[in-house]
């Protein structure tokens, strides 16, 4: 058991509190740090900020779990805080919904490539969890200088409209509240929503705005004539309800959501929720101040789960992977957590435990702190690769909802076995100390220096130490930037950085919404025994 | 299965009968209802209807913790007996610290001749980008530490040996 008064604990605590404070500061800047000019322009148009709109849309006193609040924080020279888009899960008229808002305080709500990625992710979350969606539309359209990075490919802008169509097909409701312009592709968002409300005077929907129409055909028209609230709600039928003000639009929107049937949740095992017996504040003292230092994941589990009660499965076998059952906000879950490198036995245990949870309809929570599967001659001879493959197979095919928290390191194939981004965790959160990469910076630098030296030898040149030093320095610098949690979340490799203290609440909301989607059929591929 | 606690050296069996709506404990065969009396601040319990003021302190010595509680002006020492560890402290079959995987020694924390308690870190190793603290598997005295900082080793290599302390 960890000592909460030792020097290590206090040093870790100071270190992690500093990290979390820095995260809070960045998050606050991304949420509300805007030039006065942009806020004044919004006010002059009689518009609310997108956060004010969300505040009024959700039920009073209910939480809003914001996702990817620091998307694009390391892209576009920091010009697009939050990727110019706000996404989160909240409660509207008593129904859980995902809310997606354009942010007109960032470049007029223009869609950058990462904005598209964030919107597509929001729609994927809606599909996977059968979660109704409310769009708060106010966007200038695609950010044209970067059109090649946001328009043509499979998961780019077109995917938004494909996903909207699929959502409607599977019966998941969508509502669009049109506060500003929806131009070009953006016009399809309200058009593909089952319900839409448009604000008179400021809201407009058209494939081409007045300047584009003039350029294309010479026709002169006003915004109102071309795509205003009255035209669309009384002539074209593209939008459903006109609203005199933003407040009225939100009121109508809340009434629309109140008409929707409530999704039937599948019956997960539930107990009365109770807080952890161990103080979650102590998480700060448990997480080490150095990514290389080990800590016992059971100490983390004790500060997240109900009553700090954890039924550990196979406590003596494959001890570098901790598996067991617990409840989070009353919901029964199976937890898979790293306590070291994955060996043959820990990989087999992981695969087996995942199958048990799948059989028992128990959602899985993965707590990652993994430097990889063990490498070396002895381990390969014992089949570490095929044992890791079994764990990946079980994890990929399990049909129960999966959730991942990046508690510290996530390196190499361990990321795969532990339900990294590619494995469709319903939601994936990261802590501020998180680092991720195919390998660590030191290892990558050593490997590339070795490769470079071999190249020089093959070419018959002398091995130049200065060149090798440069390769090492460049690799280390690139890795340092790209392995950080901020880079990861900037690129949307996760659904957002969270304060470790918020993990229990975030998982509670995530599990609750995941129960909307019925469990699929059980089945696995071929395990290599 | 009941928990076993020691109170001033004497062992008592405690079973949690139920938690909700109120905590009911069975101590040595007798049931008690325990309610935290929030109005009276931390440390106030109502046991079978009678109010009891309790103060608690934990003292750490190395890897071990001792818990003291003060009730009605008297201080008592409380210990938890972990059934999995009950016999482990003096298990002489665990005299060696083995390498769980190939790697290198980062720090040697204790020298030959020093007494160590079970759970105390003797050597920190690094392997697969991760530092792992290897702890004494039992109470005893370090007979020898076979590796120094920077040395590499294979899986299962013996890194240190323990002998029983005098009097054991």
Image (tube, rainbow, N blue to C red):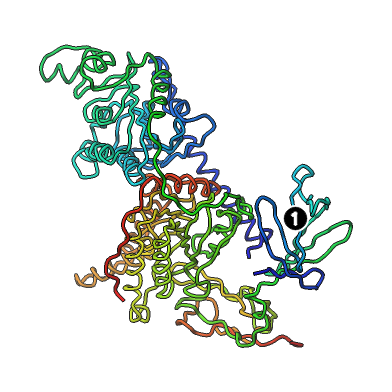
Q: Residues within 10 Å of mark 1 (few under 14, many from 20)?
A: some
| Residue A501 drawn above or below residue B138 | above
SS for tag 1?
strand
The residue lying toward the viewer, choosing from A14 and A228, is A228
- Which quadrant: the C terminus of chain A? bottom left
Farthest residue, direction front: B30
Which chain contains the residue that carries disc 1?
B
Query: Is residue A245 shown left or right of residue A165?
Result: right
| Residue B29, horizontal then vertical, whole percent | 75, 68
| Residue A165, horizontal then vertical, whole percent | 24, 37
Residue located 40% across and 70% down the image: A347
Residue A67 seen from this side: yes
Count of all numbered marks drawn on residues in the image: 1
Quarter of the view holding residue B146 = bottom right
Quarter of the view holding residue A103 = top left
Query: Is residue A204 shown left or right of residue B143?
Result: left
Query: Is residue A168 shown left or right of residue B128?
Result: left
The residue lying toward the viewer, choosing from A329 and B62, is A329
Residue A488 seen from this side: no
Quarter of the view holding residue A436 = bottom left
Residue located 27% across and 13% down the image: A230
| Residue A240, horizontal then vertical, whole percent | 29, 21
Farthest residue, direction left: A217
Tag 1 residue = B33
| Residue A90, horizontal then vertical, whole percent | 45, 36
């Amino acid at each position: 058991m960890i000592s909460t008064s030792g020097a290590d604990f206090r040093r870790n605590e100071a270190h992690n509190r500093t990290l979390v404070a820095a995260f809070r500061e960045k998050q606050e800047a991304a949420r509300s740090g805007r030039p006065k000019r942009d806020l004044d322009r919004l006010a002059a148009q009689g518009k609310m900020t997108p956060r004010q709109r969300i505040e009024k849309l959700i039920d009073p006193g209910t939480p809003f779990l914001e996702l990817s609040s620091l998307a694009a924080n390391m892209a576009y020279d920091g010009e697009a805080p939050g990727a110019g888009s706000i996404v989160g899960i909240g409660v509207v008229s008593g129904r859980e919904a995902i809310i997606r808002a354009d942010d007109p305080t960032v470049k007029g709500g223009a869609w950058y490539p990462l904005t598209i990625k964030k919107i597509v992710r929001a729609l994927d979350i809606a599909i996977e969890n059968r979660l109704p969606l409310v769009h708060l539309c106010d966007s200038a359209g695609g950010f044209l200088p970067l059109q090649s990075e946001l328009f043509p490919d499979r998961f780019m802008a077109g995917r938004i409209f494909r996903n909207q169509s699929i959502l409607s097909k599977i019966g998941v409701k969508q509502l669009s509240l049109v506060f500003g312009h929806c131009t070009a592709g953006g016009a399809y968002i309200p058009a593909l929503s089952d319900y839409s409300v448009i604000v008179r005077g400021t809201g407009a929907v058209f494939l081409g705005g007045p300047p584009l129409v003039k350029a294309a055909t010479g026709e002169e028209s006003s915004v109102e004539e071309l795509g205003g609230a009255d035209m669309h709600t009384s002539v074209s039928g593209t939008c459903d309800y006109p609203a005199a003000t933003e407040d009225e639009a939100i009121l109508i929107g809340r009434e629309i959501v109140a008409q929707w049937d409530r999704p039937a949740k599948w019956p997960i095992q539930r107990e009365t929720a109770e807080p952890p017996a161990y103080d979650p504040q102590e998480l700060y003292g448990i997480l080490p101040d150095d990514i290389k230092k080990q800590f016992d994941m059971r100490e983390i589990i004790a500060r997240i789960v109900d009553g700090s009660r954890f039924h550990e499965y196979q406590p003596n076998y494959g001890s570098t992977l901790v598996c067991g059952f617990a409840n989070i906000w009353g919901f029964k879950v199976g937890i898979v957590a790293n306590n070291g490198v994955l060996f043959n036995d820990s990989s087999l245990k992981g695969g087996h435990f995942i199958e048990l949870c799948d059989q028992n309809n128990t959602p899985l929570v993965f707590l990652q702190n993994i430097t990889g599967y063990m490498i070396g001659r002895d381990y390969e001879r014992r089949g570490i690769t095929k044992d890791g493959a079994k764990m990946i197979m079980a994890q990929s095919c399990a049909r129960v909802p999966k959730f991942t928290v990046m508690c510290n390191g996530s390196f190499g194939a361990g990321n795969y076995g532990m339900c990294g981004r590619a494995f469709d965790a319903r939601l994936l959160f990261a802590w501020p100390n998180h680092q991720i990469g195919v390998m660590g910076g030191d290892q990558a630098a050593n490997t590339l220096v070795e490769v470079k030296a071999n190249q020089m030898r093959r070419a018959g040149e002398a091995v130049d130490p200065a060149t090798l030093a440069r390769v090492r320095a460049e690799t280390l610098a690139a890795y340092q930037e790209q392995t950080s949690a901020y880079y990861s979340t900037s690129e949307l490799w996760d659904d957002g950085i969270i304060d470790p203290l918020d993990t229990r609440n975030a998982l509670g909301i995530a599990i609750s919404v995941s129960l909307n989607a019925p469990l699929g059929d059980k089945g696995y591929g071929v395990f290599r025994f | 299965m009941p928990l076993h606690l020691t109170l001033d050296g004497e062992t008592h069996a405690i079973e949690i009968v139920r938690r909700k709506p109120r905590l009911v404990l069975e101590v040595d065969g007798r049931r008690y209802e325990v309610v935290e009396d929030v109005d009276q601040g931390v440390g106030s319990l109502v046991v079978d209807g009678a109010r009891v003021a309790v103060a608690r302190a934990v003292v750490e010595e190395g890897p071990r913790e001792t818990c003291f509680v003060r009730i009605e002006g008297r201080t008592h020492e409380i210990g938890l007996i972990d059934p999995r560890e009950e016999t482990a402290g003096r298990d002489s079959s665990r005299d060696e610290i083995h390498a769980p995987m190939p790697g290198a020694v980062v720090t040697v924390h204790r020298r030959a001749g020093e007494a160590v308690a079970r759970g105390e870190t003797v050597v920190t190793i690094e392997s697969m980008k991760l530092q792992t603290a290897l702890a004494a598997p039992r109470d005893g005295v370090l007979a020898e530490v076979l590796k120094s900082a920077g040395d590499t080793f294979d899986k299962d290599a013996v890194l240190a040996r323990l002998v029983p302390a005098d009097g054991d």
